[in-house]
Image (cartoon, rainbow, N blue to C red):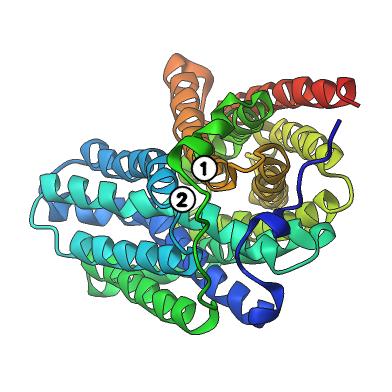
Amino acid sequence: MAQPATVSAALPVPRTAADPRLVLLALAMGGFSIGTTEFAAMSLLPQFAPGLGIDEPTAGHVISAYALGVVVGAPLIALLGARLPRRSLLIGLMAAFALANGLSALSPSYGWMLAFRFLSGLPHGAFFGVGALVAASLVPRERRAQAVSRMMLGLTLATMVGVPLANGIGQLAGWRWGFGLVAVLATATAALLFAFIPHTPGDRNASPLRELGALRRPQVWLALGTGAIGFGGLFAVYTYLATTLTEVTGASPAAIPLALGVLGLGLTVGNLVCAWAADRALMPAAGLTLLFSAATLSLYAWAAHSLWTLLPVVLLIGAGGGLATILQARLMDVAGDAQTLAAALNHSAFNTANALGPWLGGMAISAGYGWTSTGWVGVGLALGGLAIWAVSWRMDRRAG
């Protein structure tokens, strides 16, 4: 079987044109901005719900509107922007992201808030997808997953620093300032991208039709399915972690930021370790990460009754989030010359997991299985992702 062309050869960003560290810093800043608004919106929900005159379940639709924007925007922008210079596209995406979050801060009503959060989600997947391709182009092929992980480091650090910061500002000065902070961060990111990423022409041979060619490749769908299913367990636990802490563990509300920070630390460590493993054996790293996730999620129900046992398990559950970087690199292998769409769709897949995990977890709780049942839901989803990975692995082996 012919080996896929290296990503570096397919991308227009020359390695010698810029300092890779500064480019990765700018991309990581974008990840930090996006991660802050994605997760902080959940923590600010109890504040902006009364501010907009709605109850909390209704306000939860604002979170769904953002996720819907990610799912819609990732493939749409990837197709429409296929020929654009990647530097210009990234700057434009972050400028639009800054504007939409600024408008979210100024929302006069629930309806407008829904619309602005949907618009905020549109650039999310395309930014990470295009940014991952740029990051991979800066280094040799054997270090591309680690380069992508440096960009994703901004997202994981946001769960540790950005979210508590936005939440604290929201509590002190009002929820609107929490979204305003993200607008400032995104504006700073656009400036960094302008300063550090060199201008290069777009790919004249790119077209929406060529990008759609990725959808004819079974391995692309299998990689996306692995993420959409296998990643759902982490979100099932994350969504209901705060309530589990107070209702099952018996911890005070003050322990909630600590637990969320520990999960963010796990995400950060897992992102770096999984990237290192992916650069050495990509598909085995994906399978082992899914097995690791299933094992740690199976400990959740047992660990939830004590803060001393819960926090280490939450750390390990978070580490399974390194799967995102592995699958981003996998899509570079199997997408052929349709790199942009495939890379962006990875984030549509993970936002599908973001919807699927909490939905299934909520069904288990409503059925009377208790708050800790989300851990077992996560085990099922991780094993489901592993089954899809096994099909992909077998197809690779058959192809030689």
Side (left or right) of 126 relative to 54: right
Residue 243 visible in rendering: no
Is there a contact, CB below 8 Å, between mark 1 and mark 2? yes
Foreground pick, 17 / 342: 17
Instruction: Pinpoint residue 27: horizontal percent, then vertical percent.
Output: 54, 69
Q: Which percent across, then down, holds residue 234?
A: 59, 39
> Looking at the picture, which amino acid does disc 2 mark?
Ala
**The C terminus sits in image quarter:** top right
Bin the neighbour count of mark 2 within 10 Å (Cα to Cα): few under 14, some 14-19, many 20 and up: many
Name which residue type carries label 1.
Answer: Leu
Could you say which is closer to the camera, residue 147 or residue 214?
214
Q: Is residue 2 above or below residue 366?
A: below
Q: Residue at x 69, y 28 (%)?
A: 219
Q: Quadrant of residue 191?
A: bottom left
Q: Residues within 10 Å of mark 1 (few under 14, many from 20)?
A: many
Count of residue discs: 2
Q: Does residue 330 appear in the picture of this structure? A: yes
Mark before the other along the chain sequence, 1 or 2: 2
Locate the N terminus by quadrant: top right
Percent x, y of residue 339: 59, 46
- Distance in Å between CA atoms under marks 1 and 2: 8 Å
Name the residue carrying label 1.
Answer: 341
Does residue 326 lie above or below 154 as drawn? above
Q: Which mark is residue 40?
A: none
Residue at the limit of the structure toward the front, as seen here: 204
Mark nearest the camera among 1 and 2 is 2
Query: Which residue sits at x=33%, y=76%?
Result: 184
The residue that label 2 is drawn on is: 82
